[in-house]
Image (tube, coloured by chain):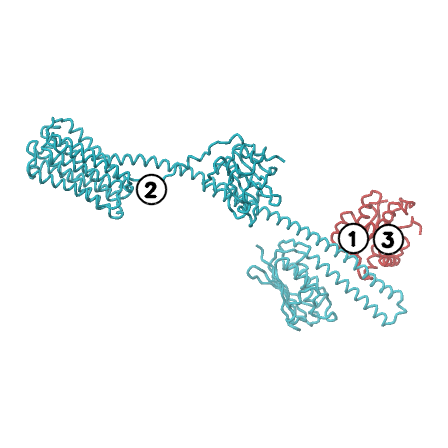
Amino acid sequence: MAPEQVEILLAEDNPEDAEMTLRALRRNNLANKLHWVKDGAEALDYLFCTGAYAGRDASRPPKLVLLDIKMPKVDGIEVLRRLKANAATHSIPVVVMTSSDEERDVFESYRLGVNSYIVKPLQFDAFIETVAKIGMYWVLTNRVPQ
Amino acid sequence: MKSFVDALGIDRLEAGAPAAGEDARSVSLPAQHGFVATRPAGQADCKLAFATVAVSALLFLGAIPFAKQPLAPVWAFIPSYQAALVVCDLVTAALLFGQARFSRSAALFVLASGYLFTACLALSHALSFPGLFAPGGVLGGGTQSTAWLYMFWHAGFPLFVIAYALLRGASHTRATAELGGVLVGGVVAVAAALTWLATAGESALPPIMQGNRYTPAMIFVVSSVWLASLAALLALWRQRAYRVLDIWLMVVMCAWLFDIGLSAVFNAGRFDLGFYAGRIYGLAAASFVLVVLLLENTSLHGRLALEHERDQRSLARHSERLRILAAIDQAVIAEQSADAIAAAVIQPLRELLDVPRAIVNRFDLASGTVEWVAAAGRRRTHVGPGVRYSLALMGDVQALRKGEPQLIDVHALPPGTEVEALLASGVRWYMAMPMIAGGELIGALSFGGEGRDFRAEQLNIAREVAAQLAIATAQTRLLERVKAHAAELEAKVHERTAELESFSYSVSHDLRAPLRAIDGYARMLEEDYAGRLDAEAQRLIGVVRANARRMGQLIDDLLAFSRLSRQQPARARLDMSALACEVGHDLRGNRPATIEVAPLPPAQADAALLRQVWTNLIGNALKYSAKKAEARVDIGAREDAGETVYWVRDNGAGFDMRYAQKLFGVFQRLHRADEFEGTGVGLAIVQRIVARHGGRVWAEGEPGAGACFYFSLPKET
């Protein structure tokens, strides 16, 4: 998979959640344009072309970031803060997908400018449907400033 | 740290200044009845009276042999003597009337009337005197008129004295000013009548004068008059517990006897030695009581002025004492620190105690030292810590512990710089009044100066203030402890809340992910291997998924329940009818159930939380009545005293009242999961929300006949 083809960046530390997310996106042919990072630090490296991703082309940002909140090293809220604070990345749509519906996370995410906040449904069918809808909407339907 | 010597030097120059209140101490008068009429006669009074009588008697006896010796008629003697007499008697009468009115004594009224009577008759006597103002006297009449008036006059007064003596014994006759008026009128009338009798009615009276000589009838008349005086003297003599007035009245009556004896018995007629000497006795007799009254009045007045001044001073001191105590009280109530209170009161306290120096000391028993909290000298006030000295300067600590003040002689203290400093600042003796709070000796109030004598009043003031300051100190300490404890508790609560929050945060994240995986992978197994799974395998996968779902629901409910205890209800006026209708409508959906909502009184409550209550109760009612052919839910309310009771009634499965108390416990269920779904958290949530609003929940039910759930909310205040 060539890096420039990436349309979705998935930041998720839980491999089962990641696999289910991939399964949902695959049904809509969105999975082959997805890059999966396993913690917040790696997500930042990817987005800002640093560390292991220093050679990545910064002019081709992903069309969507699917962001878990509770992750090792750097959590999703911090990734969101850095992303939205930077002029180069702040227009990338970010959808927080998390297990918790803790009020403080919802408030903080919206305060930082999240585009959507989704509580991962416990039931598989609902989960698949939700992820598929998000992928379709933000990648295929939504338009971002070029 | 400032040295003790320097600190004590604040008012070295004021040594030896006399205490301002010292003269007040010397004005100590015995509390006594101040009036001549009522004051008991002392030995001095008796001695003086006896001496007067003795001298008079000697003069009288010496004069008798020469009584008949004729002397030149000095006409001027008579009017001047009579005028003096009248004035003396009138003034005496006026003073006595005054005292009679004040003490409301009938006896004094009578005596005052007696003096008025003598004044009136002395006047008539002078006016009738032949050859004085007119050859036959001004009032007319004959040769006997003047002599008869003399007899009436000298017989009348003793009668008044006898009446006085009789009334005086009668215990406190309450006389009014009206009695005085009646007596004055009566006396003037009697005097006028007697004057008339002696002048116009002279012919009806036996002659007692022949020219300037006495007739034989005179012997009888004058004996009677003399006897009247003697009787008056005896009447006074018989009294018990002489008063000053009694003593001097006896002197008067003696002089009166000598007067009559010389001027009407032992002499021969007018203008002999007896005539003149008798009249001088008469004037002396009239003056005794007057002089005593006047002297007494003057001394009374002086005494009153002194007492008044003393009262004023003690009043001023008393109100200052109250002011200081009230100020301390106020400060204690305002929760000021003991040190601040001591600083504020030390100077006024020193002025009130009237000493050159007053100090509030704090004890450090462990180190055996004393520290100044606040100190006042005549010119300066020291506030705050910094001055320390040995505890030995406070006297016997054991005695102080028992609350006994210590009198300390600076010369008797072990010599050292501290003692030198005390002496240099003029403190020779001082008193240490212990401050005891909660049975613990915490300090002392010390004050002193040149002298070793401290008044009871000073000790009382110091004791009161020391007690108040001790209370303030105890309060300050208590307050600090309470504040520290409250802060500690608050910190603990914060810590616990934070722990709880992080716990439930972890629960909500970390417990859900595996559940999602269980459900997801079971589903993937179903999808990907559908052809190879038989019916039993699919059933087993279904059970796995159903339980994962159930666990998810339990976690959600549990989190919702724990969140309630962290959330403060935001109260607002709530339209309960609208809320119940809306929730009922949403929950019913397409179910074949009837929901009736009666008009409900509004509530003062948190909208989101009350929505949860209605949701859980109506949801339950729908769930448990779903198996009935005609499911019915009735919602209503009633207003009781102080609270509104709302209810949700259904015709569903009901419950056994024996288990009613388990209904509202967390995870408590009365039905098996295969009968009705549920986690057993819904009613616990209802119970917690209602309790947080100050209300109660309860339920009634019967198996198969339905249930009714009630909750009450306090009325808006």
Quadrant of the rendered image containing residue B383:
top right
Q: Position of residue B654 (x, y in %)?
A: 66, 71
Callout 2 touching callout 3 (CB < 8 Å)? no
Question: In this rendering, do the residues under marks 2 and 3 share a single chain?
Answer: no
- Residue B400 or B320: which is nearer the viewer? B400
C-alpha gap between disc 1 and disc 3:
19 Å
Which hue is chain A drawn in?
A: red
Quadrant of the rendered image containing residue B146:
top left
Quadrant of the rendered image containing residue A49:
top right
Under mark 1, the amino acid is Tyr
**Which chain does the numbered disc 1 sit on?**
A
Residue behind mark 2: B32
Q: Position of residue B286 (x, y in %)?
A: 21, 35
Q: Secondary structure at mark 1?
A: strand
Callout 2 touching callout 1 (CB < 8 Å)? no
C-alpha gap between disc 2 and disc 1:
99 Å
Neighbours of disc 3 within 10 Å: few (<14), some (14-19), many (20+) = some
Q: Secondary structure at mark 3?
A: loop
- Residue B484 or B469: which is nearer the viewer? B469
Q: Position of residue B128 (x, y in %)?
A: 12, 32
Residue behind mark 3: A38
Under mark 3, the amino acid is Lys
Which hue is chain B drawn in?
A: cyan
Q: Is residue A40 left or right of residue B418?
A: right
Q: Residue at x 30, y 36 (%)?
A: B297
Residue behind mark 1: A117
Q: Quadrant of the N terminus of chain B?
A: top right
Q: Quadrant of the C terminus of chain B?
A: bottom right
